Amino acid sequence: MAYKIDNAIVKKDKNGKVTLIDPENIFKDEDAFIAIKSDDLITIQLLINGILTNDFKSWRELGKIPENEPLKSLFVRLGYSKEDIANLLKEF
């Protein structure tokens, strides 16, 4: 079972004005938003799906992770191969 995070696109024009692009009106009643880079959002969604199927042994073994380390590096630290990540993307 794949876990889905509701999301929309936040677009900034050359003058810095931000526009919410939400064709399905998922956020029509919301007052505040958080913008996350699209590749980070996909990574977060994949990690959530991984957490749902993980026995958490690997998570305990991660230890302290430096703050400046990219989120994507968690896949490698957790022992996921390229094939594992491709399978997670197929479940998306």
Image (cartoon, rainbow, N blue to C red):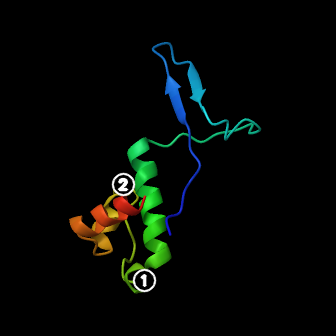
- Please tell me which residue is depicted at 63% across the width and 36% down the height of the picture: 24
Residue that sits furthest to the top in the current view = 15
Query: Would you call the spot at circle 1 few (<14 residues within 10 Å), some (14-19), or many (20 or more)?
Result: few
Q: Is residue 84 left or right of residue 30?
A: left
* Image quadrant where one finds the C terminus: bottom left
Q: Nearer the viewer, residue 57 or 5?
A: 5
The numbered mark, 2 or 1, whose residue comes first in the sequence reads 1
Q: Amino acid at mark 1?
A: Arg
Circle on res. 15: none
**Is the residue 54 above or below the residue 23 in the image?**
below
Q: Name the residue located 34 percent from the left edge and 55 percent from the top edge.
A: 70
User: What's under tag 2, amino acid-wise?
Assistant: Asn
Left or right? Give the position of 31 relative to 12: right
Q: Can you identify the residue that label 2 sits on?
A: 68
Q: Nearer the viewer, mark 2 or mark 1?
A: 1
- The residue nearer to you, when weighing 1 against 56, is 1
Q: Is residue 63 left or right of residue 12?
A: left
Residue for badge 1: 60
Q: How many neighbours does mark 2 have within 10 angstroms: few (below 14), some (14-19), or many (20 or more)?
A: few
Q: Position of residue 44 (x, y in %)?
A: 46, 57
Which percent across, then down, holds residue 12? 50, 23
Task: In the rendered view, tell whether residue 65 sits above or below residue 44.
Answer: below
- Element under label 2? loop
Q: Which residue does the image show at 68% across and 39% down from the upper left?
A: 27
Q: In this rendering, is residue 32 above or below 80?
A: above
